[in-house]
Amino acid sequence: MSLEAYARDQVIDVFADSLKVVWIVAVAIAGASFFTVFIGREMGLRKELNTAYGLDEGEKRDGNMDQAVSNNKSILTSHGRASASTIDDT
């Protein structure tokens, strides 16, 4: 079930024309994006790294990790996320 020769040529021409339109639009968007980079202002990166996720300031300053672990265990058991038997006291 193929098309007649003239119909097939018309389909190929329509498809090629549509690809030309897509190509032109893509090049226009890429060109506009390229020149937009020069308009945008520069944003500096952070110079400090904050890796103390989930610790209170007092626990971080004191370095008392046992206190932080026991606080986290009590939070887990009070919210029902873990039972007291599943948390081992190491």
Image (cartoon, rainbow, N blue to C red):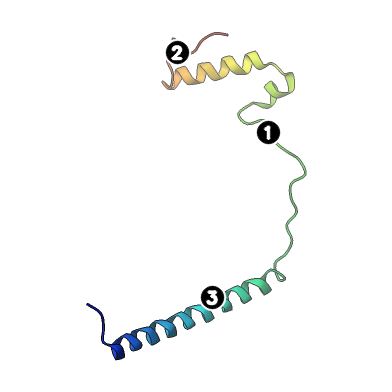
Instruction: Name the outermost residue toward the left.
Output: 1
- Give the position of the C terminus as an image quadrant: top right
Question: Is residue 3 depicted above or below 80 in this figure?
Answer: below
Q: Callout 2: few (<14), some (14-19), or many (20+) C-alpha neighbours within 10 Å?
A: few
Mark 1, secondary structure of its residue = loop
The percent position of residue 83, horizontal first and vertical second, equals 42, 14
Q: Which residue is mark 3?
A: 26
Q: Secondary structure at mark 2?
A: loop
User: Of the residues under marks 2 and 3, which one precedes in the sequence?
Assistant: 3
Residue 50 placement, left or right of 85: right
* Residue at 70% over, 24% down: 60
Q: Residue furthest right?
A: 47
What whole-number distance in Å separates the C-alpha atoms at marks 2 and 1? 27 Å
Picture coordinates of residue 57 (x, y %)? 69, 27
In space, the residues marked 1 and 3 are separated at their CA atoms by: 42 Å
The quarter of the displayed image where residue 12 is located: bottom left
| Vertical order, 12 against 86 (above or below) | below
Q: Are marks 2 and 3 in contact (CB under 8 Å)?
A: no
Say which label, 2 or 1, has the lower sequence index. Answer: 1
SS label for mark 3: helix
Give residue 70's position: percent from left, percent from top: 57, 14
Residue 86: image tag: 2
Please state which amino acid type lies under the numbered disc 3. Answer: Ala
Structural crowding at the residue carrying mark 3, measured as other residues with C-alpha within 10 Å and reported as few (<14), some (14–19) or many (≥20): few
Q: Is residue 25 left or right of residue 33?
A: left
For label 1, the crowd category at 10 Å Cα-Cα, with few meaning under 14, some 14 to 19 and many 20 or more, is few
Q: Amino acid at mark 2?
A: Thr
Q: Earlier in the sequence, mark 1 or mark 3?
A: 3
Q: What residue is pinned by disc 1?
A: 51
What type is the residue that disc 1 sits on?
Thr
Discs 1/3, front = 3
